[in-house]
Image: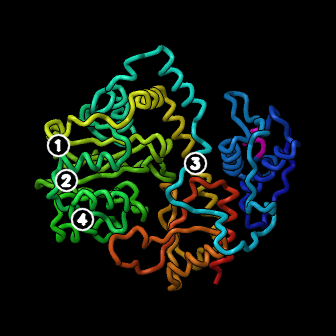
Amino acid sequence: MELLIPLDGASRKPLYEQIYTYICREIRNGNLQAGERLPSTRMLAEHLKVSRSTTQMAYSQLEAEGYIEARPCLGYFVCRVEELVEISRLENGHTEQEPECPDKNEILVDFSPRGIDLNSFPYNTWRKLSRNVLADEQKEMFLPGIRQGELDLREAIRSYLHGARGVNCSASQIIVGAGNEYLLMLLAQILGGSRRIAMENPTYKQAYRVFRSLGFSVCPIEMDENGMSLKGLEESGADVAYVMPSHQFPTGIVMPVGRRQELLKWAESGRYLIEDDYDSEFRYRGKPVPALQSLDRAGRVIYFGTFSRCIAPAIRVSYMVLPPELLERYRRQAGFYASTVSRIDQNILCQFLSKGHFERHLNRMRAIYKAKHDGLLEAIAPLEKDFSIRGEYAGIHILLTCKQGRSEEELIDQAEQAGVKVYGLSSYRIGSGADRAATLLLGYANLTLEQICSGADLLIQAWKS
């Protein structure tokens, strides 16, 4: 079949979003019936005289939202959508009109940097694996398991980390826990409470709160274009540094190999580096950046990872890789703590990893997030005169830095008046220091392409000079 999609080259709306919106509307109006086959991305691109990547982005978003499905070797088909809940661009019926100014404090689009796309969670796969785990009435699933975490799961994590992140470890070095907070508290007992911890500033505030609550002395270290300042670190007197080298939160800085080697050299004299590798799976340009731990030859890096960003926060499964010296200390001082993740959940996740479902899920989520990432960059292009954009091509948020000397508070307030929630970089700082220029975070993972473009239009209206 052919689709006669009217494309407006003069519109600010990206071409792929015009294709997405048209097909979405046709499906909802019943003009495209459930089970009907759509043209391939190649055929549609040729018919509309656009690039194939444009039609692929439109189809990726339609598939992510459940409007169409890809059948192997057959193509794309329309899904049954009677049970889908329609969310209009502004939730007021004006999906195709220019954004209207909402009432004060009515948030229409929330660019939260912490959200994820739960609409794309692999519910059917997870449900099937859950049934498999309990199918044979395995009574041992309800007994206490290995305190470090199930061996099969730790081996699956080890295999994934080695292949995807270059991490060198054995399954015996991995400890599984319910969230990074628990593992940080466990690590505190292993390290001892007299440690002085350096943290990048700005940083992930939850880790800062955990360290402070455990009685650690925390020193914020300012950052340069390469990450944590080595000069500031050396002057701080810290003996542990908490860093996010692969994609620093919230600045998005990717630490170059030279700075990584400097940090490793700093740690060689009885110090440790805590590497938080929280969202390294999502990178949209260039090759994956190996973990800092992959360069560690002296056993000074403590590696943290989580499945909260790449699968779902409710999974509550994180892991810590201890260097050999600290592993022995863990066994002596904290090895008696039982695992905080149920054996059932561990076995479901183990099957998800070992049977290839996780790899397929990651590939799908990369495509979905890249489409949203590209859509956001295109939608906010009119702001480039007044704002510089950075932190793109990785993670699930970008940063906008104002070039005109306007304050962060003013920009946030103007956005809120327009019905959009944005987040200031200063809220992630330790202490009262301020950034030289107002910088805002825009997350896009939990938004649809339509919501992203709607929010961008509202920001353009609110901030236009």
Q: Position of residue 10 (x, y in %)?
A: 78, 67
Span colored in magenta: 39-44
**What amino acid type is highlighted by mark number 1?**
Leu
Apparent side of residue 26 relative to residue 127 in the rendered image (left or right): right
First-in-chain label (4 vs 1): 4
Mark nearest the camera among 4 and 2 is 4
Question: Dividing the picture into quarters, in which one does residue 233 lie?
Answer: bottom left
Quarter of the image with the N terminus in it = top right
**Mark 1 = which residue?**
326
Mark nearest the camera among 3 and 4 is 4
- Tell me whether the residue at label 2 lies in contact with that at label 1, contact meaning CB atoms closer than 8 angstroms: yes
Q: CA distance from mark 4 to mark 1?
A: 21 Å
Q: CA distance from mark 3 to mark 4?
A: 33 Å
Q: Say if residue 452 shows up in the picture.
A: yes
Identify which residue is drawn at 45% across, 26% down.
351
Q: Say if residue 310 shows up in the picture.
A: no
**Mark 4 = which residue?**
218
Q: Position of residue 193 (x, y in %)?
A: 17, 55
